[in-house]
Image: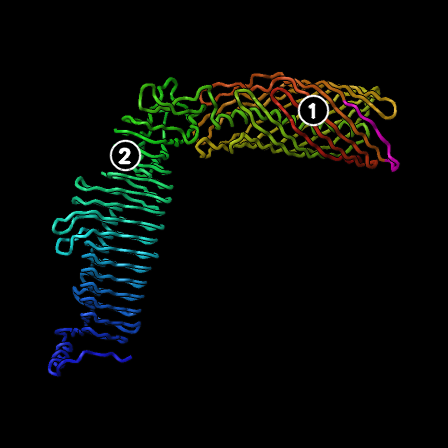
Amino acid sequence: MKVKHARVPLSLAVGLAVMASTGAVEATQIIDNRSEVVSGPVADDYMVRNRGALEVTATGSTQGIDVRSRSTLVVNGGEVAGSGTQVGVALSDESSAALVDATVSGGTFGVSGNTQSSMQVQGGTIVGNNGASFTGGSTLSLSAAALTGRTGVGAFMLGGTLNALQGSVITGQTQGVQLRQGTTATGGSDSSMTLDGSTVEGKTGSAIIVRDSADGNKGTVNILVGNNSRLIGGNGNILEVTRGMTADFTADNSQLSGDVVVDGTSTANLLFRNGASLRGNLVNVESLTLESGGRWAMTQDAQVGNLSLDDGTVDFTDRDTTPGFKTLTLDSLEGSGVFVMGIDLASGTGDLLKVTGAAEGNHQLSIASTGVDPVEGQAPHRIVETGGGDATFGLLHEIDFGTFLYTLEKGDGEDNWYLKQKPGNVLTPSAHAVLGMFSAAPTVWYGELSSLRSRMGELRLGQGQGLWMRSYGNRYNLSAGSAVAYQQDQNGVSFGADGTLPGYDGRWLLGVMGGYSESGLDYSLGSSGKIKSYYVGAYSTWMADSGYYIDAVLKYNRFRNRNDVVMSDGRKTKGEYHNDGLGASVEVGRHFKLDDGWYVEPFTQLSALWVDGDSYTLDNGLRAESDGANSVLGEVGAQVGRSLALDNGSILQPYLKVAAAHEFINSNKVKVNNNHFTNDLSGTRGEVAVGLVAQVSEVLQLHGEFQYSNGEHIEQPYGVNLGLRYNF
C-alpha cells in the first residue's frame, strides 16, 4: 500500500532529509484533520491533531506517535517505537487509540493519556521505563495484553481509570500500579482500577500503591480485583495506602496472598466476596467485610477497626509465616460468620478473638481437635473477649481435646466465652475408636471358631480322612461399655485337614487348620478400623458309639490392627499396632438318634481366649494402652435335625440349633492418655442357627449355616458360613 505524506516546501524537505541522514534530527509527520495509513516501515514520528486519523497496519512501523485534539489512532498488528525519552503512543485532549496485537515501546512511558483520552489495547505488548501514565479522567483498557515498566512502575493512574481483562499482565520493576489522586490542574479526579482475570506485579515494591497527587489533593480510590486475578508484591504487600488517601478495595472470586498496609493518615475499606480470599496481614485497616464465602487467613497478630461477616470466615490457623497462636483485635464485630482457631489446652495457650467495643451477630468457632488431654484441673480457657453487645458464639462442630469432647460457654455475668469439657464425659471419636478396637478381638476369634464348630454334622456322615474349607461372614453390633458402640463386619476363610484313628468304643479324629479373616469396624461419623487376623490351630474330636462326643480346639492368632479416625473438626488421624492371641475351646455333648432319621444333640461348651496387651499412639497425639482383651465364654444348647436319604444316594441333614451363651470376663482394662476405662462384653445372649449338611457323594460333602444371636452387649444380626469337605 502506498504511504501518503504531508506536502511541505521543497527547501524544508531537503533540509529535513539531510538532517535525518546525518542523524541530527528525526522527521515528524503531521496528520492535521485528515487520515493516513502506514503499511510499511517509516523512520519518522507522527503527530495526529484536529480530529485527524492514523492507522498503522500489521506491516507498518513508526517512531513515537502523538495523538491530540480529539484525533484517533489504530495500530493493527504494527509496531511503534519511541526513541530516547519519547513516549511510544501519547494521547491528549479527548483523543482515542485502539491497539490490536501491537508492539509499542517508549522511553519514559510506553503509552500515556490525559484530558479525557482513552486507549483500548487488545493483545500485544507495551514497554517503557514506566509502562503507562494516564491522567485527567483518561482511561486505559487492556485485554489479553502485557504492560511493562522496565525500571519503574507498571502503570501510573493520576485521576485516571485502568481496566485489565482476559489475562492481561501489568508488571513494574518497582510497583505494579500507582493509583494517585488527580492534580488540581487536571481536574483533581479520583483514580480507579478493575482487574478481571488479570495480574498486577511489583517486582521490588507493592503490587498497588495509593497516594495523593503531586500538589497534595486527596480522595478515594476504587479497586476491584475479580475472577481469579492476582496481585504480587515483591516486598510482600499487595496494597499500600499512604498520604491521607482512602482506598475502597473489593476482591471478587480471587485468591490473594500478601499484606495490606495503611499508614496512620489514610483509610482502607476491604471487601472480599464470592469465595475471594486473602492470606496475609492487615495493618491499620479501617473496615473488613467478608461475605458470600469470603475468607481471611491471618499470618500474624492483627488489629482491624470494624469486621463485618456475612457467610465469611477468618482463619487464625496459618502457622507457616509466624509460628504460634494469634490474637485478632477488633473495634467492633457484626454479622454472621466463622472463626477458625487453634487451642493447646495442655499448655493453656491458644488463639484469641478480642473485640474492644460492641460485638453483634451470630458467629461460629471452628476449633482444631487434638488427641492430647488438657492439664488436669485446668480452668476453662477463654477464647473470645468482647466489650459488650448481643453477639452469640457457638461451635461449628464439637471439639476433641484428647479423651473427651469440649463445648463453648459464655462466662457467668461476663461478655467472654470459654471452652469447657462437655458434661457427662463424652468420648471423642479418637477415644471411641481405640476403646472399640481393643474390645474387638474376642468376636474376631469366635467368628473364626464358628466355622470349625459347624463341621460336626459332616463328621457324622463321613468316614476316614479328608480336606475341608469354609468361607464365612459375620456382622456384630457391639457395646463394650464406656459408651463405646460400633458395628463389626467380618469375612474370612478357614481350611484344614484331618484323619481318623481307631479308638476304644468310637472314633478319634485329629486335624490341623488355618485361615485368614478381615474385620471392618464402623465407629460411625466416618471413623473406621480394620483387623487382619491370621491363624493356625489344631483340633481333636472323639465320637463314642454311644453318642457322646468331645470336641477340642487350640488356635493361635496374629492380629494386625489399624484405626482411621475422623475427628470432630473433620481432620483425620490414624494409628496401628500388632498383637497375638491364643485360645482354646472344649465342647461336650451327646447325639441321640430318634425315629425316622430325627436326632437331638444337647451340648455344653467352654472357651477361653487370651489376647496380649499393647499400646500405640494415634498421630494426633492420643495415647492408648490395653492390658489385654481376654474372654471366658460358656455355652449350653441343643441341636435338632433329621437325616434324609434321597433316591440318588445323597443324604441331606437339615438342623436347628438353639443355645444360651454367657461371657464371664468384665474387666479388660484400657487406658486412654491418663484416663482409665473398662471394656465389658460380659452378659448372657441367646443364639439360634439353621443349617444344612449334604452328602453329595461318598467323597464330597457340602455345608451351609445361618446364625443369629442377641444379648446385653452383643448382637449378631447374621452369621453365614458355607463350606465343603472332601474325604479320601
Q: Nearer the viewer, residue 215 or 124?
A: 215
Q: Nearer the viewer, residue 166 or 53?
A: 53
SS at mark 1? strand
Mark 1 in CB contact with mark 2 (< 8 angstroms): no
Say whether residue 646 is magenta: yes
Q: Name which residue type carries label 1.
A: Val
- Label located before the other in sequence (1 or 2): 2
Say whether residue 648 is magenta: yes
| Percent of width and height locating residue 142 | 29, 59
Residue at the disc numbered 2: 301
Residue 151 visible in the picture: no
Left/right of residue 265 with respect to residue 503 in the rendered view: left
| Percent of width and height locating residue 197 | 34, 53
Q: Nearer the viewer, residue 346 or 395?
A: 395
Dividing the picture into quarters, in which one does residue 300 lie?
top left
Q: Nearer the viewer, mark 1 or mark 2?
A: 2
Residue at the disc numbered 1: 553
Q: Name which residue type carries label 2.
A: Asp
Label 2: few (<14), some (14–19) or many (≥20) C-alpha neighbours in 10 Å? some
Left/right of residue 669 with respect to residue 84 in the rendered view: right
Q: Is residue 552 above or below residue 25?
A: above
Q: CA distance from mark 1 to mark 2?
A: 67 Å
Identify the image quadrant of the N terminus. bottom left
| Percent of width and height locating residue 442 | 61, 24
Residue at image point 23% right, 52% down: 177
Dividing the picture into quarters, in which one does residue 388 lie?
top left
Region rendered in magenta: 639-649
Residue 351 visible in the picture: yes
SS at mark 2? loop
Label 1: few (<14), some (14–19) or many (≥20) C-alpha neighbours in 10 Å? many
Residue at image point 14% right, 53% down: 183
